[in-house]
Image (cartoon, helix red, strand yellow):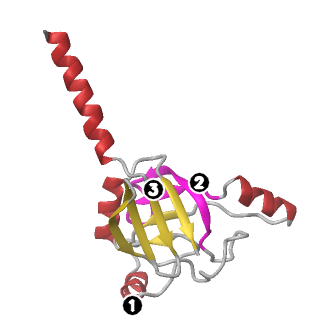
């Protein structure tokens, strides 16, 4: 009987974990909205800020562009210089091949993150809807905490123009 109870508890905990998982994050750069999707339904959406030069796909380090394409969350950093950070897998294989072909450094460290804790300026800019990052996707800290709790490493992210 104890074995049946243990199997039941294990099975129900796996089911409850699966129920919390997110299928994909979709970022629509032109709308400045991040969508959280599960079972083909938008369950959350957040206003975002992008890189200072947001139009077009990131091609090289320092271009201040937010990339476009398919990636996944490959790390969670609670000790980021910003309020929490969900690191993306940018650059992907395609990004690296294009950069190599054009003798460019594609850059790295593109993340979804909150606001810097020490910068009143970026908090002011964010509240006015301005883009201010070096290419990352920024959201306010309350939304970042909520997103942080929803997302697991390995979650897909599609960044659209």
| Residue 42 picture location, percent across and down | 35, 64
| Residue 77 picture location, percent across and down | 44, 53
Q: CA gap, disc 1 to disc 3?
A: 28 Å
Q: CA gap, disc 3 to disc 2?
A: 14 Å
Which numbered disc flags the more N-terminal residue, 1 or 3?
3
Which numbered disc flags the more N-terminal residue, 3 or 2?
3
SS state under label 3 = strand
Which numbered disc flags the more N-terminal residue, 2 or 1?
2
Q: Which mark is residue 89?
A: 2
The residue that mark 1 highlights is 128
Q: Residue at x 57, y 63 (%)?
A: 110
Residue range corresponding to the magenta coloring: 66-90
The residue that mark 3 highlights is 24
Quick check: marks 3 and 2 in contact, CB under 8 Å? no
Q: Assess disc 2: are there few (<14), some (14-19) or many (≥20) residues with their C-alpha within 10 Å of its C-alpha.
A: many
Q: Which mark is residue 149?
A: none
Q: Residue at x 62, y 58 (%)?
A: 90
Which quarter of the rendered picture does the N terminus lie within? top left
| Residue 29 picture location, percent across and down | 52, 77
Find the residue positioned furthest to the front.
40
Q: Is residue 65 left or right of residue 100?
A: left
Q: Assess disc 3: are there few (<14), some (14-19) or many (≥20) residues with their C-alpha within 10 Å of its C-alpha.
A: many
Find the residue positioned furthest to the left.
1
Determine whether 5 is above or below 153 in the image: above
């Amino acid at each position: 009987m104890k074995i049946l109870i243990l199997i039941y508890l294990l099975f129900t905990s796996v089911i409850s974990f699966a129920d919390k998982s997110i299928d994909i994050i979709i970022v629509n750069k032109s709308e400045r909205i991040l969508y959280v999707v599960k079972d083909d339904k938008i369950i959350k959406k957040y206003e975002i800020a992008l890189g200072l030069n947001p139009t077009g796909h990131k091609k090289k380090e320092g271009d201040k562009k937010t990339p476009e394409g398919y990636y996944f969350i490959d790390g969670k950093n609670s000790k980021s210089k910003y309020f929490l950070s969900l690191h993306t897998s940018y650059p992907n294989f395609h990004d690296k091949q294009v950069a190599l072909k054009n003798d460019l450094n594609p850059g790295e460290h593109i993340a979804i993150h909150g606001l810097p804790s020490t910068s009143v300026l970026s908090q002011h800019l964010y509240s006015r809807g301005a883009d201010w990052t070096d290419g990352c996707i920024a959201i306010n800290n309350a939304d970042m905490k909520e997103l942080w709790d929803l997302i697991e490493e390995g979650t897909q992210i599609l960044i659209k123009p």
